[in-house]
Image: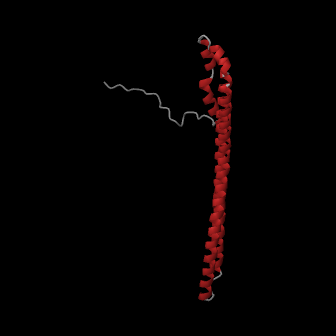
């Protein structure tokens, strides 16, 4: 005798509610980084190891953890800013390339439309002159695009360089303070 099995309808990925995108991904990362540190100081002090509480007070563990988290937040912010500058620079380069290409195409179209009915020698001379001018303009355009790209990358690198300098300065201060 055959029995039929009733199965529950399968849930599809499309039926699952989608989570709303987070408003601030930097804050999400900061919270994820801070999560393991929450309560660590209290738990270590609760171990009641002789002298540990005094040592934590000397080291200012909570202040150090806060400084570490703040430093991480600043690093992430600097990376986001550097990426934004790099992306905007890339957009500017692409936009300028598009303008240059449109200009070149319209110049050639205008020249070719003006040629019919003229002397073939004159047409060849005009094409030769246009080719030379186009080649010179292409070289100038490449230089302009390279300068645009270099500037945007330099701006992005400066953001990261400043953050690295801040980190080195903070480490130097901590080392000086720890040696006293």
Name the residue: 63% across, 73% down.
Answer: 134
Position of residue 78 relative to residue 115, above or below, is above
In front of the other: 44 or 90: 44
Q: Position of residue 56 (x, y in %)?
A: 65, 18
Residue placed most toward the observer, 129 or 42: 42
Visible in this render: residue 168?
Answer: yes
| Residue 28 percent coordinates (x, y) | 63, 33
Q: Nearer the viewer, residue 101 or 151?
A: 151
Image quadrant in which the N terminus is located: top left
Instruction: Report the residue at 66% width, 53% height from top.
Output: 152
Q: Residue at x 39, y 26 (%)?
A: 5
Q: Is residue 101 above or below residue 154?
A: below
The answer to which quarter of the image holds residue 22 is top right
Please say which color scheme the image uses.
Answer: secondary structure
User: How many dots with numbers?
Assistant: 0
Direction front: furthest residue? 180
Place of residue 166 in the rendered image (x, y in percent of width and height, measured from the top left): 68, 38
For the residue pair 67 and 114, the one nearer the viewer reads as: 67
Q: Is residue 120 above or below residue 17?
A: below
Query: Which quadrant of the rendered structure holds the C terminus?
Result: top right
Outermost residue to the left: 1
Q: Is residue 24 visible?
A: no
Name the quadrant containing residue 59.
top right
Q: Quadrant of residue 65?
A: top right
* Residue appearing at x 63%, y 19% in the figure: 41
Residue 177, position in %: x, y?
68, 27
């Amino acid at each position: 005798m055959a029995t039929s099995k009733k199965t529950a309808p399968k849930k599809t990925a499309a039926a699952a509610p989608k989570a709303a995108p987070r408003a601030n991904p930097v804050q999400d990362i900061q919270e994820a980084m801070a999560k393991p540190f929450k309560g660590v100081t209290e738990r270590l002090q609760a171990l009641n190891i002789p002298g540990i509480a005094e040592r934590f007070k000397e080291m200012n563990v909570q202040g150090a953890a806060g400084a570490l988290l703040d430093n991480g937040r600043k690093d992430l912010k600097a990376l986001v800013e550097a990426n934004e500058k790099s992306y905007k620079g890339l957009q500017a380069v692409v936009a300028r390339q598009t303008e240059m290409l449109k200009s070149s195409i319209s110049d050639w179209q205008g020249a070719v439309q003006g040629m019919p009915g003229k002397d073939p020698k004159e047409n060849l001379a005009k094409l030769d002159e246009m080719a030379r001018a186009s080649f010179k303009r292409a070289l100038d355009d490449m230089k302009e695009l390279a300068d645009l790209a270099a500037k945007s990358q330099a701006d992005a690198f400066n953001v990261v360089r400043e953050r690295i300098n801040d980190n080195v300065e903070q480490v130097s201060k901590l080392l000086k303070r720890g040696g006293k």
